[in-house]
Amino acid sequence: MTPPTTSPLPSTTADAPVLLEEHPHPGVVLLRLHRPAALNALNLQLRHALAEAFTRLDADPAVRVIVLAGSEKAFCAGADLTEYRDADPLEIMARRMGLLWDAIGHCSKPVIAAVRGWALGGGCELAMHADILVAERGTKFGQPEVKVGIMPGGGATQRLTRAVGKFRAMNILLRGEPFSGEEALAWGLASELAEDGQAETRALTMARELCELPPLALRQVKASVLQGMNVGLDAGLAFERTAFATLFASEDKREGMAARLEKRAARFQGR
């Protein structure tokens, strides 16, 4: 596989906290957290860079799938405690972290997290913002916030509970102990388990496969699943039916069905 070309995001320098790696396959981009000396800990600069990157990539019609990755030692070791130690409640509220998380969570395109090394606290929460999570066997997940006198603030009490259930989530959140990639897969947090050193390769392969599928349908699937997590069954089904009907106006629907009937490969354009 040809290695991706690494470049900083526009208006940043080579030491930017987030790097954009453009993959040779059209439509696939890899966002890499780039604070290796701090194990990719989330400081405000990195949080803003991630939000800006996701906002820009979501609006870019050439981008179809986003792969989110860290480094060999850590996907993300959590929040940078140096920015929290002396903070008071008003300062925390003024940071408006929800807007930064929402830029990732509201991305309309498929997001695949390639998780290796440490994924703790905010790092685990960041991984849970993805749609598909590929973990390595040796990955260490965890929500250790309780051990420093606080609690998760990036969605873990909600997303983790939805992923693994109340009792498993309570055990993780109240005790603050780490758990492995194998456990994450068994509990329903990870989509797939890769051998150590292979998470990014597997995530990029999945991204290339998704790029061959109709982007409008992928977006509607994602929107319907996320909508269904936030509303009751009847409202979720109503949203799904509307999304289903909407796709019948797309050129991709006509191309996909024609290709299947004609026994040829489809050429989806996202229209």
Image: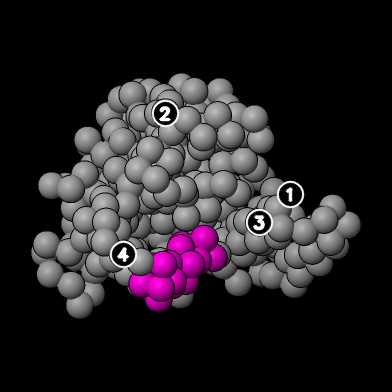
Tell me if 143 is positioned left or right of 220 in this view.
left
Depth check, mark 4 against mark 1: the one in front is: 4
**Farthest right residue?**
234
Task: Please say if 12 is above or below 73.
Answer: below
Q: Secondary structure at mark 1?
A: helix
> What amino acid does circle 3 point to?
Leu
Give the image location of residue 47, x and y in percent. 33, 63
Q: Is residue 108 visible?
A: yes
Q: Which residue is mark 4?
A: 87
**Cα distance between the residues tagged 4 and 2:** 25 Å
Q: Which mark is residue 177?
A: 2
| Residue at x 18%, y 72% (from the top left corner) | 12
The mark nearer the N terminus, 4 or 1, is 4
Q: Mark 2–mark 3 contact, CB under 8 Å?
A: no
- 242 falls in the magenta region: no
Depth check, mark 4 against mark 2: the one in front is: 4
Give the image location of residue 141, x and y in percent. 40, 33
Depth check, mark 3 against mark 4: the one in front is: 4
Q: Is residue 210 visible?
A: no
Q: Which mark is residue 75?
A: none
Q: Secondary structure at mark 2?
A: loop
Q: Which residue is mark 3?
A: 226
Over which residues does the magenta segment extend? 89-107
